[in-house]
Structure formats: C-alpha cells, structure tokens
Amino acid sequence: ILSTTSERLSQGEIQQIEKAIKKDMTEDIYYEMVSDKTASLFSASCKLGAISVTEESDKREAMSSFGEKFGLVFQIKDDLLDITGNIEGLGKPAGFDLKKNMLTLPLIYLFENLNRSEAKTLKRKIGKHVKRSELKEVKRLIEKNGGIEYAEKQIDRLSKDAISELDIFPDSKYKQALIAALE
C-alpha cells in the first residue's frame, strides 16, 4: 500500500508540474492528478486503518474508496479556499496556487467555459507572474462564470459518494466521526 501510494504521489506531482507549464489541464486530467497526489494519501490511511481492525476485504476496500473520495473533496475545497480564503484561514495567501501556476478545478472550469480566444488570452496573462490586480480579475471571472458554484457541486457529489461507501458499516460513533470529518 505504501509503495503504491509513493508511486502515485510521484506520478501526480510530475503531472502537475508538466500541466502547469503547458497550461493544458482538462477536468479529467485534474481528477487523475489529484487522485494520485492527494487522494492516494487519504485512501492509504483509511485502508491501513481498516487492515488493523478487520480481515474483511470488502470493508477494507470500502474504507480505501471512502478515503479516495475524501481526498478529492479535500483538494477541491483547498482549491476553493485558494480563491475565496485568506492567509489566516489557509496558512497561505489566497491566490497562492495561481501564483505558482497550479491549475485548480475552478480555474479549469473557467478555461473550459470561456471562448477559445478569451481562454488563450487569460492563459497567456497568468502564464508568467500574476500580479495582485490580475488575481482579483481572475477571481471575478471564476465567480462570474460559475467556477466556484461548480466546484461546490463537485464537493457535494463526492461527499455523498464517500458517505455511501460507509453504508457497509453499522452506525457507530466511529462512522459518525468519519462523516463529521468529511463534512
């Protein structure tokens, strides 16, 4: 589990660097990258915890899948906070990911919903060094074009999917703790 997770982390990191340079991330590639880079850690943690308490493979896999979806939710929420949050709440300044040329789900959604010319112009503008005034403009464009709302819908969808993975377990304070952590 740990070696597979290490491999996935490396693949996700390489893919992120490559896509940040080329600025050609699609939503499918984003999910693949985030799954490798972030969700794999959540999945491994949950599966290792399950291995320590049960020999039932279906319960181990349910926990692994729960963790994978939890990790996706975590990353998308981080993407949103990068746009809407502040340094006190994040531990990093808002817009930090954009300044580091990281393509987040709300920004990918924006690129996919602008016409080709507008998307190309915006990619060129943020391709080098993003100024504070440009960060505000990008945030405004993301909000105006529904990127924040779209990311919130993805969080809701994935959260419901993650919780459904726990249906295999009886109600307990442990199951409720997992759901509370996700929420």
Image (cartoon, grey):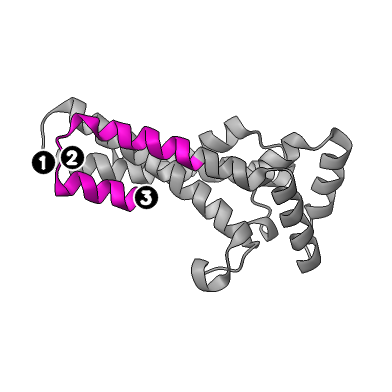
State the residue lying farthest toward the bottom: 88
Query: Is 126 in the magenta?
Result: no
> Whole-percent x and y of residue 115?
84, 34
Residue type indicated by callout 2: Ala
Q: Which residue is mark 3?
A: 183
Alpha carbon separation for disc pair 1 and 3: 24 Å
> Whole-percent x and y of residue 15?
58, 40
Give the mark nearest the N terminus, 1 or 3.
1
* The N terminus lies in quadrant: top left
Residue type indicated by callout 1: Val
Query: Is 167 in the magenta?
Result: yes
Q: Which circle marks residue 50 in the picture?
A: 2
Q: Main secondary structure of the magenta part?
A: helix
Residue type indicated by callout 3: Glu
Give the mark nearest the N terminus, 2 or 3.
2
Alpha carbon separation for disc pair 2 and 3: 21 Å
1 vs 3, front mark: 3
Q: How many residues crowd mark 1 within 10 Å: few (<14), some (14–19), many (20+)?
A: few
* Badge 2 vs badge 1, beta-carbon distance below 8 Å: yes
Asked whether residue 138 appears in the rendered view, the answer is yes
Circle 1: element type:
loop
Q: Is residue 80 left or right of residue 120?
A: left
> In percent of the image, x 35 and y 36: which residue is there?
162
Quarter occupied by residue 136: bottom right
> In percent of the image, x 15 and y 49: which residue is there?
173
Q: Which residue is mark 1?
A: 53
Q: How many residues crowd mark 2 within 10 Å: few (<14), some (14–19), many (20+)?
A: some
- Which residues are drawn in magenta? 155-183
Circle 3: element type:
loop
